């Protein structure tokens, strides 16, 4: 532990422990309810690593500007590292005067190194300090979300690889539409998640801008080198306007939007799997580890992992709305309202990280019932194939569509499947269509194989996409 500064004693430590950073102008103490209302330490303490990292770099910048002696700078760095160790070990003891993570760190630093701690805040405001902390935190969180998304994509690609030719009904309006493969279904969500990852990368580029050195709102007059600060903290750009630097929370709103949209994608996938796991469908079964039972009905196996993914998408969307409502009427520059940016952000990041882990594991361990999928296919789903055959024979598509529609209506009236419609009925609509041509259309595997355009559901195309994704994901 670093040695305390000269003259440090109990009176100094007591003063550091009870003073507010801003208390000199005030004659009265903050009311207890106001302190509770105002203090953010209970939730922003999770920014301790970012706050301490930023403070160490700031101390180095103050030293380079001649505002700290080498001994003071070294004492501050050693003290800050000790505070970090206490937080990391869970041994940091908060004090009622710790209204936020910044005051908590500085208060404890004063207890460790003495008067030098009071120089750390030179030229810095909590406004540019918290903006820096939050950007550092969001940068790390975005990278972690990207990793979770990668794992879910990998689980979906693994299932797709096993089911490139497993036929199942495709749906529009939740009505049977055309046959597809389960591998193709899996890859649809891989594409959605790829867009999410792209948005995260794009947002990271915009949030990786250094606000430190902007002061409270007007900039810094202490000769601190902001370019060196940016390099030391890993920022790729520096804020160009100090007012905007301390009041900008676009990056929080953008990250919350991305989280909400990921939640929507997870909800859509979950809804499919909830339906597919029901007795009525029976297409898939979730592993016991990602299902729950009923407190009353012993036979039940509920897809609660998917239902929670679906439900929590509303929570993620609500957090986005909360930050937009906080920001919509704020004048420049910093306002205390902006303290409300953290709880929705932290909640969304925590919720989504856990949800993505559960989603990846649930997808990786689900069982596909290929027989039930195939049994759900219906020859009527090949009506479009019949229209396509007429088109290849020279019938305009709109006319072909109408003719096949007449055949469907007639089959329904007679109570037979479309392939079993009497030839006379068929030829009444299309005279040159013979029985062999009609039979050749109603082959489900052939129908799927014909959808061989890039991105189509043909097994050959699904295999190509699986290989592409395996290479992109590294496995």
Image: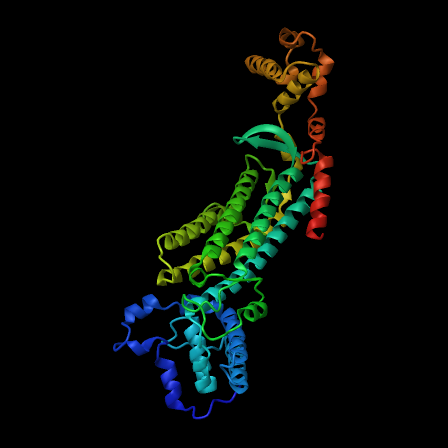
Picture quarter containing residue 431?
Answer: top right
**Residue drawn 65% across the image and 15% down it:** 420
Image position of 147 (left or right of 132):
right
Q: Position of residue 339 (x, y in %)?
A: 39, 62
Q: Is residue 149 visible?
A: yes
Q: Residue at the bottom extreme? A: 7
Residue 20, relative to residue 353: is it above or below?
below
Q: Position of residue 378 (x, y in %)?
A: 62, 25
**Residue drawn 39% across the image and 53% down it:** 322
Q: Is residue 295 visible?
A: no
Image position of 453 (left or right of 138):
right
Picture quarter containing residue 331?
Answer: bottom left
Q: Position of residue 450 (x, y in %)?
A: 71, 28
Image position of 108 (left or right of 33):
right
Residue 439, relative to residue 118: is it above or below?
above
Q: Position of residue 123 (x, y in %)?
A: 44, 74
Compare residues 379 and 349 and report the one nearer the observer.
349
């Amino acid at each position: 532990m670093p040695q305390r500064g000269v003259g440090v004693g109990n009176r100094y430590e007591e003063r550091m422990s009870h003073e507010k950073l801003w208390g000199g102008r005030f004659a009265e103490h903050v009311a207890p309810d106001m302190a509770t209302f105002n203090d953010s330490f209970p939730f922003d303490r999770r920014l301790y690593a970012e706050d301490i990292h930023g403070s160490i770099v700031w101390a180095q910048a103050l030293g380079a500007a001649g505002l700290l002696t080498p001994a003071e700078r070294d004492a501050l760095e050693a003290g800050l590292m000790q505070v970090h160790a206490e937080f990391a070990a869970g041994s940091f003891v908060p004090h009622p005067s710790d209204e936020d993570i910044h005051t908590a760190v500085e208060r404890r630093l004063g207890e460790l190194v003495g008067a030098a701690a009071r120089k750390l805040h030179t030229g810095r405001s909590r406004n540019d300090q918290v903006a820096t902390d939050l950007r550092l935190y969001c940068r790390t969180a975005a990278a972690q979300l990207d990793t979770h998304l990668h794992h879910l994509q990998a689980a979906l690609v693994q299932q797709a690889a096993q089911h490139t030719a497993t036929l199942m009904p495709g749906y529009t309006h939740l009505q049977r539409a055309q046959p597809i493969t389960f591998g193709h279904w899996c890859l649809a969500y891989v594409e959605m998640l790829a867009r999410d990852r792209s948005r995260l990368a794009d947002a990271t580029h915009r949030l990786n801008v250094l606000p430190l050195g902007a002061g409270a709102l007007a900039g810094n007059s202490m000769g601190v080198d902001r370019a060196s600060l940016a390099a030391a903290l890993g920022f790729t750009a520096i804020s160009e306007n100090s007012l905007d630097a301390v009041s900008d929370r676009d990056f929080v709103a953008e990250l919350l939007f991305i989280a909400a949209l990921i939640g929507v994608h997870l909800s859509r996938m979950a809804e499919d799997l909830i339906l597919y796991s029901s007795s009525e469908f029976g297409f898939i079964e979730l592993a016991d580890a990602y299902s729950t039972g009923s407190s009353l009905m012993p036979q039940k196996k509920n897809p609660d992992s998917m239902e929670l993914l679906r439900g929590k998408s509303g929570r993620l969307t609500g957090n986005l709305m909360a930050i937009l409502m906080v920001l919509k009427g704020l004048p420049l520059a910093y306002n205390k309202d902006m303290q409300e940016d953290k709880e929705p952000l932290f909640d969304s990041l925590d919720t989504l990280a856990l949800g993505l882990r559960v989603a990846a594991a649930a997808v990786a361990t689900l069982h596909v019932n290929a027989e039930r999928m195939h049994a759900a296919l219906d020859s009527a789903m090949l009506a479009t194939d019949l229209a396509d055959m007429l088109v290849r024979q020279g019938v305009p598509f709109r006319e072909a569509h109408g003719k096949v529609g007449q055949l469907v209506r007639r089959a329904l009236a007679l109570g037979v499947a479309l392939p079993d419609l009497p030839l006379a009925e068929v030829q009444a609509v299309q005279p040159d269509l013979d029985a062999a041509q009609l039979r050749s259309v109603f082959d489900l595997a052939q129908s799927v194989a014909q959808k061989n355009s890039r991105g189509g559901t043909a097994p050959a195309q699904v295999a190509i996409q699986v290989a592409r994704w395996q290479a992109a994901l590294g496995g």
